[in-house]
Amino acid sequence: MNRSVAVMRMHLVDRITLFLMPTSILAASFAINVAVWSLEPPSGSRTTGAAISVYCFVLAAAMLCVTRGLPFALGMGSSRRAFTLGTGMTGLVLALVMGTAYLVLNRLEVLTNGWWLHGAFFELPWFHGTSPALLWVAFTVAFLAVFMLGALVAAVWFRWNSSLLVIGAPATVVVVGGGAVLLTWRHGWDNIWHWFGDLTPMSMTGWLAVATVVFAGLTWATLRRVRAA
């Protein structure tokens, strides 16, 4: 556990990548939306979904944590298990911070009626009426799931490197394309859309939590076989 904490502290040294950059991207995206809203009179739905952009950067930040941190951590005597756990703890810290920030901004947006412009940046219609506690859990789990997905992507790249492009990319196309053809043949798309339509904030959070555990397990299973540089 001490080594895992050391790995987490190593990651958290880079506060620019983990905290400053996501915050800057969020602020820039929000400022653009406010500028657009202020130039147009309120009419209908003013939801852009731009707040999701931060999740993309969290994905990239997790990949950087693994690609930059793993060689150094292994060189300093850390085990792969400690590195995986420490990276997960880093993702949890980031998810707690970002989830809390999203909740606070969501509540402010509701209280100010969309920043006095009837806009919806943090208050997505799908979450309307959801309790603040569940909102916080949903935001936090979503950030953690995205972070662990990024860690898994980086771990896969470390494990197979160029072989991933030569074999993995075509295999992925075959599997995804074959699955799409099979669903079309079996008329299964309607069931999938219905399943997504029946999701609630609570059930979605549960599925994201399951995905987070799966991503973490696959990351550990992959990193444990990575050779030290």
Image (cartoon, rainbow, N blue to C red):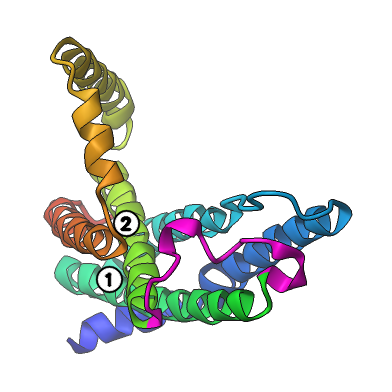
The picture places residue 50, in percent across and down from the top left corner, at 60, 53
Q: Residue furthest front?
A: 44
The picture places residue 21, in percent across and down from the top left corner, at 61, 66
For residue 72, say whether it is visible: no
* Marker disc for residue 151: 2
Q: Secondary structure at mark 2?
A: helix
Q: Secondary structure at mark 1?
A: helix
Crowding near the residue tagged with mark 1, few <14, some 14–19, many ≥20 C-alpha atoms within 10 Å: many
**Relative depth, front residue between 154 and 34:** 34
Quadrant into which the C terminus falls: bottom left
Q: Are marks 2 and 1 in contact (CB under 8 Å)?
A: yes
Magenta-colored stretch includes residue 192: no
Crowding near the residue tagged with mark 2, few <14, some 14–19, many ≥20 C-alpha atoms within 10 Å: many
Residue at image mark 1: 88
**Relative depth, front residue between 74 and 160:** 160
Question: At x 39% / y 65%, what residue is drawn?
Answer: 143
Write the start and end of the magenta stretch as one range: 114-132
Quarter location, residue 71: bottom left
Is 226 on the left-hand or right-hand side of 65?
A: left
The picture places residue 214, in percent across and down from the top left corner, at 15, 56
Quadrant into which the N terminus falls: bottom left
Question: At x 33% / y 26%, what residue is drawn?
Answer: 165
Instruction: State the separation of the CA atoms marked 2 and 1.
Output: 9 Å
Quarter location, residue 134: bottom left
For residue 129, say whether it is visible: yes
The picture places residue 64, in percent across and down from the top left corner, at 45, 58
First along the sequence among labels 2 and 1: 1
Q: Is residue 132 above or below residue 222?
A: below
- The three-letter code of the residue at mark 1 reads Gly
Question: At x 18% / y 23%, what residue is drawn?
Answer: 188
- The three-letter code of the residue at mark 2 reads Ala
Question: At x 51% / y 70%, what residue is drawn?
Answer: 18
